[in-house]
Image (tube, coloured by chain):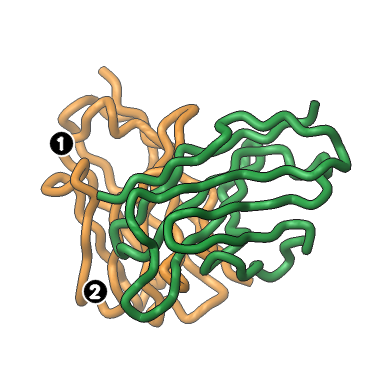
Amino acid sequence: DVVMTQSPLSLPVTLGQPASISCRSSQSLVHSDGNTYLNWFQQRPGQSPRRLIYKVSNRDSGVPDRFSGSGSDTDFTLKISRVEAEDVGVYYCMEGTHWPRYTFGQGTKLEIK
Amino acid sequence: QVQLVESGGGLVKPGGSLRLSCAASGFTFRDYYMSWIRQAPGKGLEWVAYISSASIYSDYADSVKGRFTISRDDAQNSLYLQMNSLRAEDTALYYCARENWSSFDFWGQGALVTVSS
């Protein structure tokens, strides 16, 4: 089974400063169709998860452009260029390459310093 | 707009059964694969089960295989999760989610299942 490992698990950030979350998979996430199905979700306190990024770097509709995803093979990153108060919550990476056995990372809790 | 509304959660004793429902609207339900995902209190996300369009295929996490059954009624735009032989470790908020690009683009608000004597 694929294991997704996020770091850090806790991320205190000053408003207006950048933030970065790493996600590493135990196996390559390159699918036989050539795509890499690595996703990022945001879960604000008391809310359902919301997808931010799919296929490594594609932002969902309505997601601010301060969020960006990058990476390849087994190593991926979610970056927030300037953290805002509404970004507080838990961020999860999730791989869909080994569909339908989706695997989530443990989550990274972002808080304002 | 896309809406997914779960219902059917509640308190059940260990060994008991419960059936969750998810009412979908705002999109052509029959065209999409659907999944259930759960989140234990204070914990992370765990994929539970998926069902393909036309109910041709389904699959389950090892933790629920043989106890849970996913189904859908495209005429009613509804997704279901029949949960039998429930255990304390099944206590969680259960989300239904629409699949898109080997991912989940819309989620419901969740239905809370508590397994306790």
Label 1 marks a residue whose chain is B
Provide the secondary structure element on which disc 2 rests: helix
In the displayed structure, B17 sits above or below B29; it is above
Residue B59 shown left or right of residue B33 in the figure: left
* Residue at the left extreme of this rendering: B66
The reply to whether residue B61 is in sight is yes
The residue drawn where x is 30% and y is 68% is B72
* Residue at the right extreme of this rendering: A16
The residue drawn where x is 44% and y is 41% is A5
In the displayed structure, B51 sits above or below B5; it is below
Cα gap from disc 2 to disc 1, whole angstroms: 23 Å
> Which residue occupies the foreground of this view, B39 or A80?
A80
Q: Which of marks 2 and 1 is nearer the N terminus?
A: 2
Say what amino acid the circle numbered 1 marks. Answer: Ser
**Quarter of the figure with residue A13:** top right
Residue B85 numbered tag = 1
Instruction: Give the chain letter for orange.
Output: B
How many circles with numbers are drawn on the protein? 2
Say what amino acid the circle numbered 2 marks. Answer: Ser
Instruction: Give the chain letter for green.
Output: A
Residue B42 shown left or right of residue B75 in the figure: right
The residue drawn where x is 43% and y is 56% is A74
Q: Mark 2 points at which residue?
A: B55
